[in-house]
Amino acid sequence: MSAEMRNSYTTGPDEKGRFGNFGGRFVSETLMPLILDLEAEYDKARTDPDFWAEMDHLWKHYVGRPSPLYFASRVTEALGGARIYYKRDELNHTGAHKINNVLGQILLAKRMGKQRIIAETGAGQHGVATATVCAKFGLKCIVYMGAHDVERQKPNVFRMKMLGAEVRPVISGRGTLKDAMNDALRDWVTYVDETFYCIGTVAGPHPYPAMVRDFQAIIGKETRAQIQEAENRLPDSLVACIGGGSNAMGLFHPFLDDPSVRIIGVEAGGKGVNDRMEHCASLTGGRPGVLHGNRTYLLQDAAGQILEGHSISAGLDYPGIGPEHAWLHDAGRAEYVSVTDDEALEAFRFCCRTEGIIPALEPAHALAHVRKLAPTLPGDHILVMNMCGRGDKDIFTVADHLGWQMDRE
């Protein structure tokens, strides 16, 4: 692989916000000045030592970074084959990777003089992180959340309200993440002057995909140093779940120019990847189109209408994927597979009882693939999986699907 090809994996996006044929900026004229202001502010911040010093301080003293890289010895023994490490971002303050990015965006909002913060959320972790940081800095917070997700993620709805956020249920469509993002964008157009839109994943119009990736790349940077300390070499493979794909891109990006590192993203296969689109595996079962300000792979019908999809996991229940993932897929640098609801549920139970860690349903999808992959690999193979969220929020959903009563021993 030439140096030029290697470098191309980490230099994107281009000046138009494109990763190859994906990404870009497809927004209304009303939003364009705000997008350009945000891009200019981030361009200044990313080279400002004071900005990163404040980020480093907050990551360490507020979030609790660095998160541990944990050798999952019992999972390794149970599966056989590869040595399995968890990057434990579920130990962050608020219980997921989302706060890594939210801190960066809220600091940008403060620099821009914005006092009203809006966000979309699916599983509720991005909403909780946004509400948390807004509470810390005394900012107004409004979170759009699909009505269906409000019902299945009640613990996180309660947390957001306790933190002072206004949670606005979205009843359009199927009431999931796509619909929440639609309403957040409508709000932004309506209240352009005082509002900052804090997007939770590596999607949306440029500069969001690259900006969110840069904030989340702390995951991969820490992993790179930690695995060198633990094993004195790089990992052989990385595995992470993907909805929009911010936790995965955060882990993957610092390793993209290391051809020896195999990179695998795990999409939500729902009830199985089929023509009925009862899944959210947009790379596995979708095709390119435009949604929420960027061009990427989407679940859509023959007429280009966006389909709803399905996943047991609210955080993966999105009919698209971040444009950088779409580019890495087409470039062949990363592999993308899918895992069904049932496989994720079984991995959830396996992790609880084998390693004493209750995962969120999102990383349970990644673990489900690890369960298939690890036994096929040699014993000296090092595999790192991103445990990007904890499962407190999902216990009622899991209990319902398993047919358990909550008072059952």
Image (cartoon, rainbow, N blue to C red):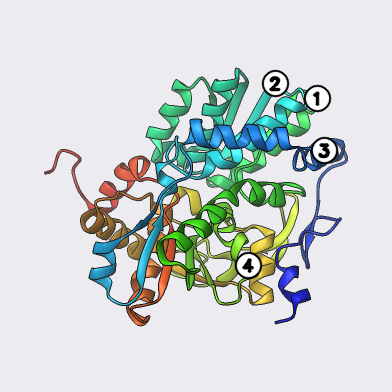
Residue 274 vertical position relative to residue 314 in the rendered view, above or below: below
Determine crowd level at label 1: few under 14, some 14-19, many 20+ residues with C-alpha closer than 10 A: few
Is disc 3 placed on a helix, strand or loop? loop
User: Could you say which is closer to the camera, residue 146 or residue 50?
Assistant: 50
Q: Is residue 82 left or right of residue 160?
A: left
Q: Label 2: which residue?
A: 115
Inspect the image, locate mark 1, and give the three-letter code of the amino acid beneath it. Asp
Q: Which residue is drawn at 48% across and 40% down?
A: 125
Using the rendered view, name the quadrant where residue 369 is placed: bottom left
Q: Which residue is drawn at 67% across and 51% down?
A: 203
Residue 149 in percent (x, y) is at: 46, 41
Q: Is residue 35 left or right of residue 122?
A: right
Callouts 1 and 2 close, C-beta under 8 Å: no
Q: Residue 193 carries which label?
A: 1
Q: Is residue 305 left or right of residue 262?
A: right
Q: Nearer the viewer, mark 2 or mark 4?
A: 4
Q: In which quarter of the image is the N terminus?
A: bottom right
Residue 182 in percent (x, y) is at: 66, 42
